[in-house]
DNA sequence: TTTAGATGGCCCGTT
DNA sequence: GCCATCTAAA
């Protein structure tokens, strides 16, 4: 019960493993502390040692310690390290992402806000689905972009353009509440609402958490700041670690001012700077620091290292993505290093494809982290929808997803009727089904089918009350005949197989969740799975090459990092050109990419890319900002290939698309065609097979 | 009225 | 490479 009192730790030994600044950070336990921690300066070490110090030396109960991390994976790793330092697992320590901590709080108190404790969490796709049903016809905008507007609106970063939009936002929020569901923003906002409407709740948590820690503070948003203010109100011992040069989540509302203004927001802050880098070679560190020094919006700091100088960074010009991919594969093969040493980074997920192909061709084993996510696959979403509906009967989005999956003769027409019926009477979708059965409002055949469905769900619900997550998931897969449905609906044998394997994998992962967690209930599983991040899934010990976006790679380190596609308009991304702030964020992103490396960095850029079919590409302007003595340009002559095709003379200075009406172009499926018209990034082209309208950005056209 | 099959459209990054 | 939507068949 009070086993935390018996942790023994050798204080001298603990502190001897830290440098002066790190030690000061560990020992400054009282009051607000801001640790400015450059890349590779040992911030994870500081956080884990500090918590171990609090528990093992100062005798603080783990129950009084809270730590916010950026990913669940980071939380798990830190917990493990702390347990190692303490020679035992501290019980009652709260460590996790802001979202998972807030969900934990809300599971206890959200009924105060009129929600039910078994609420569902809606991701972006769920949001879009819900919005789609609310928008109906007459919207030129797609539900996905509307979802992101709503997110910005909720965080005070967007004002509705007109009354119709404002009305939609309001209806969206009501629909969420009716579905007893929270979106990602709500998880934070409802926590704030809880704290503000019920100050005693906020107070009790604040009393409990005497020591609060926040990792990656530069990427917190306004809501997270407000939550921290509430939680730290009683004791004021708030310890944040961050690096303004690694702020890369502005697009999702992260406010770099949180870290820049910390000293003002929390008076009497102790500021500690960790400037010695333990990770990278001098060359890598110099390249990264010089690059980011071109940013204006920063406080600035000087990192140094005792590590060796190391190799220069090759900047490799490639003809196109396939050429680039080939060279990347060659680098890996020639190095003689184990595959696990390599991290391949790119700006956008779509860039992984060419690389994957080249790696497969050479039998180089790899893993792609993120991108088309496992949990976004149809078969996985189907099964999860059943599970969510079992837990939360009001969850309309899940209900509508599986009402006719596998097909049970309940079609569009019926759904439309029930939808209208529920709206007219202000009742939930599920209740509308029940009522229309009761009042026999549809034809007998349909009534029968609906009744069968309802009985199935109610039976699942009954079973779920005595089963763990794995048992009930297995029942769902079996009793819905889901595999049989896959057999019928899939196009090819291999598709059937891969989908079936995915479902099996899902069941396997639920099983291990149940085995590894004290609370193996369906509710607890669903919470965890909704808040899973890409990197959480990553198995670092698989012994293979890793591929991911720079965003996903945050916090990781690898011996060798290969950054691909470093061309203007991809990295920096063209969508960032609207403001200096955004371009600076792109620069920080490249800085993050480079600083993932311990020993070697390679940078490649292709002259042509299928995702940018508008002619020759320029190397990223960021490359010119790297110090001369840290890099080697490896040019690649283009004169032999393609020289006749693209009038190379000045197509490079032309930033707009080079196609014009009258041009004869080649398309991989339709063959040769003549451009008739160009408008809004689309081209109307006459092919032998007929006239087609193609989006230039995706059509991958080449001039003939 | 529902279902299966074909076609167009598409995304920067993510809790 | 996937999904939504449209169209033809059951």
Image (cartoon, coloured by chain):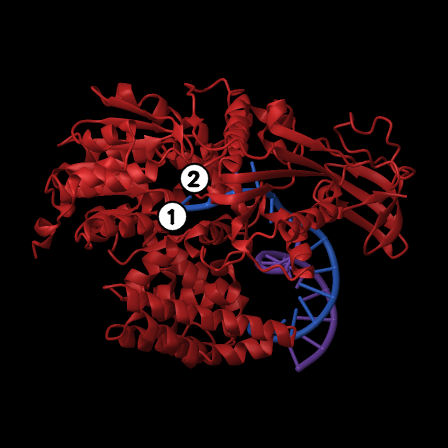
Chain colours: A red, B blue, C purple
Query: Mark 2: few, some, or many residues within 10 Å (few <14, many ≥20)?
Result: many
Q: Is residue A192 above or below residue A444?
A: above
Q: Is residue A161 above or below residue A109?
A: above
Indicate the quadrant containing the C terminus of chain A: top left, top right, bottom left or bottom right.
top right
As rendered, which of A295 and A227 lies closer to the eye? A295
Is residue A197 visible to the viewer in this orientation of the structure? no
As rendered, which of A2 and A445 lies closer to the eye? A2
Q: Quadrant of residue A545?
A: bottom right
Which residue is at a point 43% across and 25% down the rendered structure image? A303
Tell me whether circle 2 and circle 1 mark residues in contact (CB < 8 Å): yes
Query: Mark 1: few, some, or many residues within 10 Å (few <14, many ≥20)?
Result: some
Percent position (x, y) of residue A95? 26, 47
User: Which residue lies under the disc numbered 2?
Assistant: A151
Percent position (x, y) of residue A40? 41, 35
Measure how far apart labels 2 and 1 are at the Cα level.
9 Å
Secondary structure beneath label 1: strand
Q: Is residue A313 above or below residue A128?
A: above
Is residue A372 visible to the viewer in this orientation of the structure? yes
User: Which residue lies under the disc numbered 1?
Assistant: A183
Percent position (x, y) of residue A429? 39, 62
Q: Is residue A74 above or below residue A507?
A: above
């Amino acid at each position: 019960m009070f086993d935390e009192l018996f942790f023994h730790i050798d204080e001298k030994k603990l502190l001897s493993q830290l440098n002066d600044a790190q030690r000061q950070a560990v020992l400054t336990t009282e009051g607000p502390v801001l640790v400015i921690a450059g890349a590779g300066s040992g911030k994870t070490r500081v956080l884990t040692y500090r918590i171990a110090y609090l528990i093992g030396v100062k005798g603080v109960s783990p129950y009084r310690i809270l730590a916010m991390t950026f990913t669940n994976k980071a939380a798990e790793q830190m917990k493990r390290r702390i347990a190692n330092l303490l020679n035992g697992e501290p019980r009652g320590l709260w460590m996790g992402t802001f979202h998972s901590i807030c969900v934990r709080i809300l599971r206890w108190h959200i009924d105060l806000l009129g929600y039910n404790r078994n609420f569902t969490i809606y991701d972006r796709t769920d949001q879009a689905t819900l919005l789609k049903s609310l928008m109906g016809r007459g919207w030129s905008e797609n539900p996905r972009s509307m979802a992101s507007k709503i997110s910005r609106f909720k965080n005070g970063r967007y004002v509705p353009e007109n009354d119709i939009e404002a009305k939609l936002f309001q209806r969206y929020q009501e629909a969420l509440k009716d579905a007893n569901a929270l979106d990602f923003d709500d998880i934070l906002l409802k926590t704030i609402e809880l704290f503000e409407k019920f100050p005693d709740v906020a107070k009790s948590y604040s009393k409990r958490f005497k020591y609060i820690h926040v990792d990656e503070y530069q990427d917190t948003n306004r809501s997270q700041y407000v939550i921290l203010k509430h939680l730290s109100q009683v004791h004021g011992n708030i310890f944040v670690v961050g690096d303004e040069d690694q702020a890369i989540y502005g697009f999702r509302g992260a406010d770099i001012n949180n870290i820049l203004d910390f000293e003002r927001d929390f008076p009497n802050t102790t500021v500690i700077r960790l400037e010695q880098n333990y990770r990278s070679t001098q060359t890598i560190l110099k390249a990264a620091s010089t690059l980011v020094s071109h940013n204006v919006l920063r406080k600035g700091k000087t990192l140094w290292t005792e590590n060796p100088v190391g190799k220069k960074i090759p900047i490799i010009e490639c003809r196109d993505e396939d050429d680039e991919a080939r060279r990347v594969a060659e680098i890996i093969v020639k190095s003689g290093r184990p595959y696990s040493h390599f991290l391949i980074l790119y700006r956008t997920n779509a860039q992984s494809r060419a690389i994957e192909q080249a790696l497969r061709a050479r039998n180089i084993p790899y893993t792609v982290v993120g991108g088309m996510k496992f949990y976004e696959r149809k078969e996985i979403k189907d099964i999860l929808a059943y599970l969510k509906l079992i837990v939360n009967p009001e969850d309309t989005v899940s209900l509508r997803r599986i009402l006719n999956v596998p097909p049970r003769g309940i079609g569009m027409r019926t759904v439309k009727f029930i939808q209208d019926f529920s709206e007219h009477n202000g009742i939930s979708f599920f209740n509308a089904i029940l009522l229309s059965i009761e009042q026999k409002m549809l034809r007998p055949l349909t009534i029968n089918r609906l009744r069968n469905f309802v009985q199935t769900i109610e039976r699942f619900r009954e079973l779920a009350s005595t089963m763990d997550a794995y048992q009930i998931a297995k029942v769902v897969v079996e009793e819905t005949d889901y595999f049989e449905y896959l057999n019928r609906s899939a196009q090819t044998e291999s598709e059937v197989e891969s989908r079936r394997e995915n479902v099996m994998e899902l069941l396997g992962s639920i099983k291990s969740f149940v085995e590894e967690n004290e609370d193996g209930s369906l509710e607890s599983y669903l919470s965890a799975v909704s808040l899973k991040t890409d990197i959480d899934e990553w198995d670092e010990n698989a012994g293979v090459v890793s591929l991911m976006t720079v965003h996903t790679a945050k916090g990781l380190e690898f011996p060798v990092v290969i950054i691909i596609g470093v061309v203007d308009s991809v990295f920096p991304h063209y969508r960032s050109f609207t403001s200096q702030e955004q371009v600076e964020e792109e620069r920080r992103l490249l800085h993050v990419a480079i600083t993932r490396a311990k020993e070697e960095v390679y940078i490649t850029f292709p002259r042509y890319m299928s995702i940018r079919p508008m002619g020759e590409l320029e190397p990223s302007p960021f490359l010119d900002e790297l110090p001369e003595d840290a890099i080697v340009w490896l040019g690649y002559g283009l004169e032999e290939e393609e020289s006749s095709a693209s009038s190379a003379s000045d197509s490079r200075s032309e930033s707009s698309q080079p196609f014009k009406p009258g041009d004869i172009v080649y398309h991989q499926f339709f063959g040769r065609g003549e451009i008739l018209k160009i408008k809004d990034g689309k081209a109307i082209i006459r092919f032998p097979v007929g006239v087609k309208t193609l989006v230039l950005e995706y059509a991958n056209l080449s001039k003939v």
